[in-house]
Image (cartoon, rainbow, N blue to C red):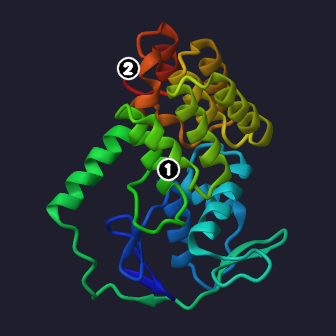
Amino acid sequence: MKSFKAFRLDTANHLLWRNGDRVPVAPKGFDVLAYLVEHAGQVVTQDELLEALWPETYVNPEVLRKYILEIRKTLGDRHKDPEFIETLPKRGYRFIAPVVDDSAAEPPDLSASDAAEDHATEEKVGHETAPSENPQATYVHLTLDKILVAEGKPQQALAEIEKEPSDWGKLTGQILTYHALGREQDSNAALAALIAKYPTLMAYQIAEVYAYRGESDKSFEWLDHAYKQRDPGLPEIISDPLFKNLRHDPRYAELLKKMRLPT
């Protein structure tokens, strides 16, 4: 357990806490943060991070920059006046907040009901993390939006996704929710914005929403982009419920074989 300012990083359970409340972090984003915290005060190069977290796999460096950006949002950090992650141009990143090793301290207790809720969230949402009570935390409202859409409650989902602070997260949720509401023009507009703004970083998410909307050819087109870009989220296609419309298509099994995943 590592502490820095109001945060505690529980590397054993893959959890981040702020003042006793859980903060949702994407799994690979957590790994990036944990590596920087573990090497606090040291300059960590981009190549070192990529090699440590994606060994033997080519990952577009833009993916790493996306995770750094999302971590900063989660921590409430500022790029120009950082409290946590300092960017050193052409050198790398350095975690600059004082870090205390609390390994001997007891981690916050997770009750059985919390664990059950986490498992249910993972089943419904796939690659999103469990929601937190912090309304400004990135991904919380996208997570709830996906759950509500899956439960057939698109009107409630729409109210939820409007609170999502992440731009790409809000667009992703809007595509899903507007489609569930039958508002195809609005869904198409959000999809066009997501593609225009994030054609490289969000290939997996674009494929995801196309699959949910039943547009298999478009979904496979973007999955191919994600594969060529070595998108680190791509292996999660197996458990992602938004891809269920593709699972009887022969191209789905072919893609899994290319990635050496079980079919």
Nearer to me, 249 or 197: 197
Residue 111: name its quadrant. Answer: bottom left
Residue in view at x 71 percent, y 68 percent = 45
Is any part of residue 199 visible from this angle?
no
Residue 263 lies left or right of residue 203; in this view the side is left
In the image as oriented, which residue stretches furthest toward the top? 250
Q: Which label belongs to residue 160?
A: 1
Decide if residue 192 is in sight here: yes
In the rendered view, tell whether residue 178 sits above or below residue 144: above
Looking at the image, which residue is at 49% across and 65% down? 135
Q: Is residue 37 left or right of residue 131?
A: right
- Find residue 8 and report its image quarter: bottom left
Q: Which mark is residue 40?
A: none
Mark 1 crowd level (few <14, some 14–19, many ≥20, 10 Å Cα): many
Quarter of the picture containing the N terminus is bottom left
SS at badge 2: loop
* Badge 2 density bin: few <14, some 14–19, many ≥20, Cα 10 Å: few
Which percent across, then down, holds residue 63?
67, 50
Of residues 229 and 6, the one nearer the viewer is 6
In three-dimensional space, the C-alpha distance between marks 2 and 1, rounded to whole angstroms, equals 35 Å
Q: Residue furthest toward the left?
A: 112
237 up-or-down from 50: above or below: above
Q: Amino acid at mark 2?
A: Thr
Q: Position of residue 209 (x, y in %)?
A: 57, 29
Answer with mark 2 or mark 1, whichever residue precedes in sequence: 1
SS category of the residue bearing label 1: helix
Tag 2 residue: 263
* Residue extending farthest right: 90
Q: Position of residue 204 (x, y in %)?
A: 60, 35
